[in-house]
Amino acid sequence: MARDTQDAGSGTAVVPPAPPTPPRGPGGDDGDTAWGRPTSPRTMLSRALSVPLVLGLAVFFPLWVCTQPGSGAHDAAFWLQLALTVYSGARLSAMVLTSKRKLLQGSFWLFVYMAMGVAPLAQAVLGQVPTPVVGARGDLTEAIALILAGCIAFDIGVLLARHRPGGRGRGETRPALVHRRRLYVLVGLSFVASALFVQKLGGPAVFFSSRQEIIAGIEDAGLSQADSQAGQAILRGFGTVPALLSLLVYTRWLVTSRRARRSVAVIAVWSALVLLNCVVNNPISNPRYWFLTVMFSLLFTVFPRSAAMYRSALSLGVVVALIVFPFADRFRYDDKNYKPMQTTSILEPLALKDYDQVGMFANTITFVHSGEGHTFGLQFAGDVLFAVPRSVWSGKPKDTGVVVAEWMDTKNTNLSSPVWAELWIDFGPLGVFFGLLGIGYASARVDRRYARRAVRRTPPGSLVSVLVPLVAGYSFILLRGPLLQATGRVAIALVCVALVTTWKRDGRARMQ
């Protein structure tokens, strides 16, 4: 990493000139696709892997799933599901093989391929689902068609972002940085908030027992009732989010700054934050999707520019989602209530656990068609204003998943509500299309900025280098839904970011 030098008389930082900008290749991409540049061994490796990877994810594996014995009907819904799986598999392969690290786009296609593609395809083949689909078969067909349309809209948004005029130059705004002194305030807040969280739930031992014990601790704290959902979200959020964000910033500081690695104080604080996160953000006491957020964000903070790590993470993500994730609920219950699944099939866990997103979208469509109608933004307003107590807003909507589950009259109301369903219940098909188009556009813009700035020569306090991996990990929760459950941690993260953000390059407050 290039280091700044100081003028002894003025104290002004003198930054070495930046290397010349590489020529832009066809389609607007930078250096890696420029004409006339010699092919690197990494590029040759990507080309060698491209054919087996695309064929494996988009052709051979879906066809293998289709050949398994089962009682599922081969109707329009089945063929649409197969088309969705093939499309998302091809797009995920493109994310793995790209010369740029596209974290948000890669996370999107990893989620779609597994949760909206392979798992529902296995359910269609076996004729088994984790959550009943209560409506007509046509509603399921409509749901799959809308998911596929949303994926196409996402890609259109990416294309619009790619051809947006402008780019780097003198007019580009200064990057947001972490203010070092405010960071110390955030670290102090992290320890205080997490300590209160641990004390409220009964001590550190609870966090190494099971999620069932955590729920019991929340009930003992009086925060399990429907009227206390906001209080529960705030308690969980402040107990976990500041600790994780502080750890990510300090990790980035150590990775990119030789001076920080020589500082005993920085290493000591980082070590304390590691221990704190081992308590409040461990996989035993937290939902699997949140721990996935923790691991994903840490991975790409430690390896900010490793193409090999990026490709490995997406490729291994498929294996984890297939094999590990369905069995990773070992710590959801205590020993008395845990009932392990006895199966020798790789498809049956996908059909019976967790992946209910397509089915719940179909149920949401049936819910709207049954006469309930669209909410025209009311559900989204409830998500944004999650902290408003029901005593103030008597008509405050519940989680979309809970609303549909109660209408279905199911015992378990903790069901998913993917972003497609959230957009549909508010704004219908146009909401799904334009909502996913906007998500694709925003993802491409953020990924491009991250690719430019998340490198070792950027300042250690670069916020985008920390926030993009965090958002990429948390996108699995946002895409799965319900949004009301996800917005609590988002709001607290925004407060923490606002606390430490600065655009000034003050040498006294800069992380070095």
Image: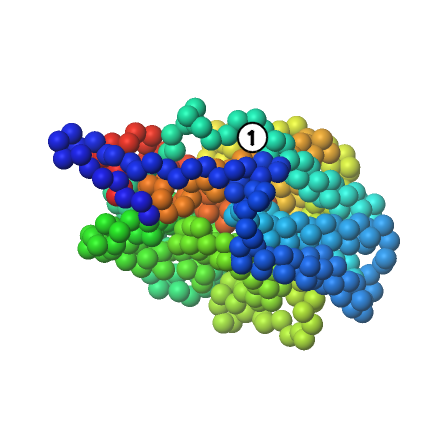
Residue 267 position (above or below residue 364):
below
Mark yes or no: residue 486 visible. Answer: no
Q: Nearer the viewer, residue 216 or 428?
A: 428
Residue at image coords 42%, 66%: 209
Depth check, front residue: 359 or 166: 166
Q: Which quadrant of the figure has residue 512?
A: top left
Q: Position of residue 130 (x, y in %)?
A: 68, 58
* Whether residue 64 can be seen here: yes
Q: Residue at x 32, y 32 (%)?
A: 502
State the residue at coordinates (59%, 64%). Answer: 319
Left of 139 or right of it: where is 426? left
The relative height of residue 395 versus residue 347 in the rendered view (above or below) is above
- The single residue placed furthest to the top in the displayed view is 171
Q: Quadrant of residue 186?
A: top left
Residue position marked by numbered label 1 in the rendering: 381
Residue 32 image point, x, y percent: 54, 46
Where is residue 10? Give x, y as percent.
16, 29
| Residue occupying the point 80% across, 69% down | 69
Circle 1 SS class? helix
